[in-house]
Amino acid sequence: MLSLLAALLLPTPLKDLLGNVTSATSYRYNLKDADGRGMDCLEVSQAAGARDYLGVYHSLEGGFFRLYVAQSKDLLDWRPRVKIDDRASQGSLQQVGGKFLLAYEVDRTPGNFIRLRLYPSRAALEAGNHERQVDLPAQLSQLAEGTPSFVSADVATGNIALHFHFLSETGVDRTSEGTLTNWSNWKSKPRTDLNSALERVGARGNFGDRTPFTYRGKRYELQEVQFGKYDWYSWRVFLHDLGAGTISRLVVRTHGGSNSFANPNVRFLTLPNGKPGLVQTLFIPSEGSAPGEAGCLIFTKQLAAESS
């Protein structure tokens, strides 16, 4: 059973690391790619041995979302490489060996679902040439399943574990988990303990995107939580300690004092200066945003070698 974690019990260095944007090494609000597109829900990754970065994100164009992959050398300026799919969003990219596995949400009739694509190389990814595609059948909701994030992935066996959201019977998104076996057998279920814990803190809106990470040998997730249904001002971020089974709200401090935050993504990687660091992105809704801060926020922090 998940318990609530008092904010003062959350290690201060991690709390400040993830929440204090004003101490960032570099940052940019309202992030756009080189073609002027908003980079909503950007997730950054770094290929093994690479000194540049890949980002998967979506942008609203012509009334629907398109999913893109872009490349950057400095984490602030992004050059689009390929459009992945139309009516697609919430992408998550993982390198497995020399291959790249992409999971994302697809908007189709009768409802959203999760699509997996496997690319044999980085060159194939940037050219949009996948070698395998699997559409995961909706099991928890026929209206909406999406915002996937990887728990584990073995492309040799086709055994892949995901966390994602589904639209519950009460009309709000709730967290869930699923496992694909041999590229064909998909089984999913709600994350009942986590959903109950978030409801106990008073959240009545959507529980959607999340990002897993490891810090000082411990496993965590950042989880977006909406306190009021349809209330974009009420989006907040919670830290979920996966080992202890505890949650605590993460207080985010921006330069202008924005209050609403969603779609957290964090990665520990090598910064452009060659030093270890993290890159984090958040979506700041216009409701609850300070002037000039709405849209995708990206920021980096340099770390001591032993911090990650």
Image: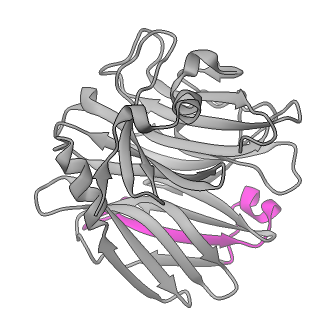
Q: Nearer the viewer, residue 303 or 204?
A: 303
The magenta segment is 107-131
Q: Please determine whether, in this image, residue 231 is positioned above or below residue 217.
A: above
- Residue drawn at (68%, 77%) of the image: 131
- Residue drawn at (68%, 37%) of the image: 278
Left/right placement of residue 93 relative to residue 60 reads right
Q: Is residue 63 visible?
A: no
Q: Percent x, y for residue 205?
A: 20, 44
Query: What is the tally of numbered marks visible in this picture?
Result: 0
Q: Is residue 60 covered in magenta?
A: no
Q: Residue furthest left?
A: 170
Q: Percent x, y for residue 220?
A: 51, 52
Q: Please determine whether, in this image, residue 32 is positioned above or below residue 159.
A: above
Q: Is residue 50 visible?
A: yes
Left/right placement of residue 97 relative to residue 42 reads right
Q: Nearer the viewer, residue 53 or 203?
A: 203
- Residue drawn at (89%, 36%) of the image: 274
Q: Is residue 120 covered in magenta?
A: yes
Q: Residue furthest front?
A: 9
Q: Quadrant of residue 249?
A: top left
Left/right placement of residue 281 relative to residue 135 reads right
